[in-house]
Image (cartoon, rainbow, N blue to C red):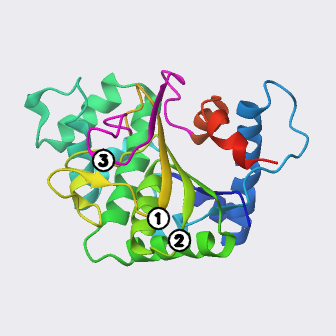
């Protein structure tokens, strides 16, 4: 029985391309990085000597399509309609965006490029297209991504699932859709699950009376978020989900606020993972 399965977040299509359009190659490259990042957080500065922590990464980025933006902040001006909708709904939730920008995509895009750190604009150029692709009504990408994650969890039977960014949405929906997938611990990192008008209301199953719920076959749920992560709005999920056993708010990096490298290496996962590591 494998201990840990990872579910990746946005911006990971390049691993598929670099591996010659191979899912296995993309997964292997990502898993090697996750092992190094986790070691940094678990080993108190000891060098990584090939230790394995993650059994497999559930890879699904190729099912969302290759987005030509690839993180280019200038691409926010040329997004498709669904991507624009996600971008504007997300930008409205940032405190710095005034009411005068609502409904005006070009102003939102211009504001991001001129006012926000370049890293934030690059994040938006990835976040909006991939979230829109996954959440598209009747889209094959959503079903395909959930099936891919379910297959990896079913094959490995992990005790722990670590889901980052958009991967937390895919993992949440997958676990609800497949009640045979029993997991002792779900760890969500930088999760947009509670993001109103973008993700929360579109979840399957839909929230009831304004609240979502921990998948019933998941024994414990730990949510970890950077206080300044602009993907994790709100950073704490207990306000909109029942069954979050532990909330951990961290301070990663004001500029590098969302990467899985920072989350896995920050040390906050240690106390939750060590019981599952030999």
Q: Is residue 22 visible?
A: no
User: Residue 268 at x, y = what percent?
Assistant: 60, 30
Q: Residue most toward the left? A: 100
| Residue neighbourhood size for the residue with mark 2, other residues' Cα within 10 Å, grouped as few (<14), some (14–19), many (≥20) | some
| Residue neighbourhood size for the residue with mark 1, other residues' Cα within 10 Å, grouped as few (<14), some (14–19), many (≥20) | some
**Vertical order, 217 against 31 (above or below):** below
The mark closer to the camera, 3 or 1, is 1
Tell me, for residue 14, which label it has, or none. none
| Residue beneath the point at 42% across and 59% down | 172
User: Which residue is denoted by mark 2 in the rendering?
Assistant: 181
User: Residue 221 at x, y = what percent?
Assistant: 47, 47
**Vertical order, 221 against 43 (above or below):** below
Q: Give the magenta part as a residue range.
A: 232-259
| Residue beneath the point at 32% across and 60% down | 132
The answer to whether the residues at label 2 and label 1 have Cβ atoms under 8 Å apart is: yes
User: Residue 278 at x, y = what percent?
Assistant: 82, 48
Choose between 114 and 117: the one closer to the eye. 117
Tag 2's secondary structure? Answer: loop
Q: Earlier in the sequence, mark 2 or mark 1?
A: 2
Quadrant assignment, res 273: top right
Q: Main secondary structure of the magenta part?
A: loop
C-alpha separation, residue under disc 2 versus residue under disc 3: 20 Å
User: Which residue is denoted by mark 1 in the rendering?
Assistant: 217
User: Which residue is denoted by mark 3 in the rendering?
Assistant: 241
Quick check: 16 left or right of 181? right
Q: Residue most toward the right? A: 49
Q: Earlier in the sequence, mark 3 or mark 1?
A: 1
C-alpha separation, residue under disc 3 versus residue under disc 1: 15 Å
């Amino acid at each position: 029985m494998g201990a840990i399965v990872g579910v990746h977040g946005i911006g990971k299509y390049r691993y598929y391309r670099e591996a010659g359009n191979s899912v296995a190659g993309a997964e292997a490259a990502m898993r090697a990085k996750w092992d190094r990042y986790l070691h940094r957080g678990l080993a108190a500065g000891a060098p990584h000597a090939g230790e394995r922590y993650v059994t497999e990464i559930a890879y699904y980025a190729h099912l969302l399509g290759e987005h030509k933006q690839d993180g280019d902040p200038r691409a926010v001006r040329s997004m498709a309609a669904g991507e624009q909708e996600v971008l504007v709904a997300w930008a409205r939730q940032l405190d710095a965006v005034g009411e005068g920008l609502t409904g005006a995509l070009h102003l939102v895009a211009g504001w991001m490029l001129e006012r926000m750190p370049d890293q934030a604009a690059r994040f938006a150029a990835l976040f909006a297209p991939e979230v829109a692709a996954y959440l598209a009504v009747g889209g094959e990408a959503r079903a395909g991504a959930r099936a891919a994650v379910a297959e990896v969890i079913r094959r490995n039977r992990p005790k722990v699932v670590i889901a980052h960014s958009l991967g937390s949405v895919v993992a949440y929906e997958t676990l609800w859709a497949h009640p045979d997938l029993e997991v002792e611990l779900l760890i969500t990192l930088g999760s947009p699950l509670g993001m109103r008008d973008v993700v929360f209301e579109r979840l399957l199953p839909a929230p009831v009376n304004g609240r979502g719920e921990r998948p019933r076959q998941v024994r414990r749920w730990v949510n970890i978020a950077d206080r300044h992560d602009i993907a994790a709005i709100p950073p704490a999920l207990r306000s909109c989900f029942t069954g979050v056993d532990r909330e951990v708010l961290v301070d990663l990096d004001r500029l590098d606020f969302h990467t899985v490298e920072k989350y896995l290496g920050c040390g906050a996962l240690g106390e939750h993972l060590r019981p599952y590591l030999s």
